[in-house]
Image (tube, grey):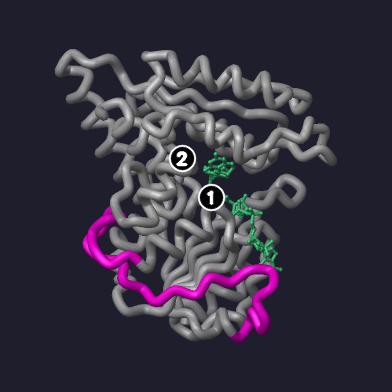
C-alpha cells in the first residue's frame, strides 16, 4: 500500500480563502481590519519558520500584523510590560507569544512561560493557551480552539476521515499540541469545529512503556514529539492514518517526527513535512484572529 498524501497546504488555502472573504465582509461593514501582534523572543528555529509564513498569510487575508522581535536577553518584566501594552492597544485583536521562550541554557533570562501566558488577555489569546481558554476547552465550550490541534481536526474532516469510534494515539503531551489534541479528539459533540470527534484516545509520552506497541494500536497516529523521524514504519499499523506535527530543522531541511518513506508504505494516509500540519496551524490562527476581532 502507498499512503494518500494529505495535502495540508491545499486545505489550508481553502480555509484561508474562507477567512479572507469573511475579513472582507467585516471590513466592508465599516469595521477596522483584524490585527495580529506576534512576539518572538530569541531565535527558536520552528518559531522562525512560523513567523515568516504567518506574516505573509495575514497580509493575503487582509489581516494586519505586527512582529516584535525581542532579544533572548529580554527579562520577564520587559516581556510582561510589552504584553500589557498589547492588551490595552485597541487596534490589536490577537496576541501570540512564540513558544518556547529561550531557556537559560540558550541565552534566556529564565522567563516563566506560565506567567507570560497568564498575562495575555483571554479575549486576545488566539493561541488559546491562557488558563481561561484552556479551561473552556476542557469543558467543551471553547472560545478559541488551539491552532495546531484545530488544524488537524479540520484536515481530517475535510479529507473525509472520520474520528468517530477510532482509536487515536497522540505521542507528545505538550500544552501546545499533544494535550489539547487528545482532549479535542475525545470531545463528544460539535464543540471542536466539526460535528463529532468521539475518538478513543491514548496520550503517549517519553515515559510510555512499549511506545512502539502502543503506536501500532492506533487507527489514527499523531506525532508531536520534536524528534526527527522517531516514528518508524514498524510502529504503524497497516492502513493507519498518520499525522506528523514535527517541525525539526536538520541541516537546511525541515523534517517531521515520522520517517516518511517507511510510514508511507504502511499507512493509508499521511501528512508530509513540509506541506502538512504547519500550513493548517497558520490558517487556524487567521481564523482565530478574525474571531477575536469580532468578539
Ligand atoms: N506543525 C505545527 O504547526 C507545529 C509544530 N510543532 C512541532 O511539533 C513538535 C512537538 O512540539 P511540542 O508539542 O511543542 O513539543 P514539546 O517539546 O513541548 O513536547 C514534546 C513531547 O514529546 C514527548 N517525547 C519526547 N521524546 C519522546 C520519546 N522519545 N518518546 C515519546 N515521547 C517523547 C515529551 O514527553 P515528556 O512530556 O515526557 O517530556 C513531550 O510530551 C516540534 O517539532 C515542534 O516544532 C509545534 C507546534 C506547531
Ligand atoms: N505560541 C506559539 N504558537 C504556535 O503555534 C507555535 C509556537 N508558539 N512556536 C513554534 C511552533 C511551530 N509552529 C509552526 C507553525 C507553522 C509552520 C509552517 O508554516 N510550516 C510550513 C513550513 C514551510 C516552509 O517554510 O518550509 C510547513 O510545514 O509546510 C511551522 C511551525 C507553530 N508553533
Q: Which residues are magenta?
A: 187-213
Q: CA distance from mark 1 to mark 2?
A: 8 Å
Residue furthest left in the image: 29
Judge whether 188 appears above or below 84 on screen.
below
Residue 127 is labelled as 2
Residue 202 covered by magenta stretch = yes
Q: What secondary structure is found at the residue carrying circle 1?
A: loop
Numbered label attached to residue 65: none
Task: Rate crowding at label 2 as few (under 14), some (14 to 19) or many (20 or more) other CA atoms within 10 Å.
Answer: many
118, above or below 29, in the image = below
* Quadrant hosting residue 187: bottom left
Label 1 close to label 2 by CB (< 8 Å):
yes
Cβ of mark 2 under 8 A from ligand 2:
yes
Q: Which residue is mark 1?
A: 176
Given residues 148 and 123, the one toward you in this image is 123
Residue depicted at x 29% and y 59%? 158
Q: Which mark sits nearer the N-terminus, 1 or 2?
A: 2
- How many numbered dots are placed on residues in this image? 2
Q: Residue at x 63, y 35 (%)?
A: 48
Residue 184 falls left or right of residue 98 = left
User: x%, y% of residue 252?
Assistant: 72, 45
Nearer to us in this view, 244 or 253: 244
63 lies above or below 283: above
**Label 1: few (<14), some or many (≥20) within 10 Å?**
some
Say which residue appears at 36% left-offset and 49% top-offset: 136
The residue at label 1 has a CB less than 8 Å from ligand 1: yes
Q: Nearer the viewer, residue 211 or 156?
A: 211
Amino acid at each position: 500500500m502507498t499512503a494518500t498524501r494529505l495535502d495540508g497546504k491545499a486545505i489550508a488555502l481553502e480555509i484561508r480563502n474562507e477567512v479572507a472573504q469573511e475579513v472582507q465582509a467585516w471590513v466592508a461593514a465599516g469595521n477596522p481590519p483584524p490585527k495580529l501582534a506576534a512576539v518572538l523572543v530569541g531565535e527558536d528555529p520552528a518559531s522562525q519558520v512560523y513567523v515568516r509564513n504567518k506574516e505573509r498569510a495575514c497580509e493575503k487575508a487582509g489581516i494586519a500584523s505586527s512582529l516584535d522581535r525581542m532579544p533572548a536577553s529580554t527579562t520577564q518584566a520587559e516581556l510582561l510590560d510589552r504584553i500589557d501594552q498589547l492588551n490595552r492597544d485597541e487596534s490589536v485583536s490577537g496576541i501570540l507569544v512564540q513558544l518556547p521562550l529561550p531557556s537559560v541554557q540558550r541565552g534566556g533570562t529564565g522567563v516563566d512561560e506560565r506567567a507570560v501566558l497568564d498575562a495575555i488577555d483571554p479575549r486576545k489569546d488566539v493561541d488559546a493557551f491562557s488558563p481561561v481558554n484552556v479551561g473552556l476547552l476542557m469543558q467543551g465550550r471553547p472560545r478559541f480552539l488551539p491552532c495546531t490541534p484545530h488544524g488537524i481536526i479540520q484536515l481530517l474532516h475535510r479529507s473525509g476521515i472520520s474520528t468517530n469510534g477510532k482509536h487515536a494515539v497522540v505521542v507528545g503531551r505538550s500544552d501546545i499540541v499533544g494535550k489539547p489534541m487528545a482532549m479535542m479528539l475525545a470531545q463528544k459533540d460539535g464543540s471542536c469545529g466539526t460535528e463529532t470527534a468521539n475518538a478513543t484516545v491514548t496520550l503517549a509520552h517519553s515515559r510510555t512503556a512499549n511506545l512502539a506497541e502502543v503506536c501500532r494500536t492506533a487507527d489514527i497516529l499523531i506525532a508531536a514529539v520534536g524528534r526527527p523521524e522517531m516514528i518508524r514504519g514498524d510502529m504503524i499499523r497497516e492502513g493507519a492514518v498518520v499525522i506528523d506535527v514535527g517541525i525539526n530543522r536538520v541541516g537546511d531541511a525541515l523534517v517531521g517526527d515520522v520517517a516518511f518513506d517507511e510510514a508511507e508504505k504502511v499507512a493509508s494516509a499521511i501528512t508530509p513535512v513540509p506541506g502538512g500540519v504547519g500550513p493548517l496551524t497558520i490558517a487556524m490562527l487567521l481564523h482565530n484572529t478574525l474571531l477575536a476581532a469580532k468578539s
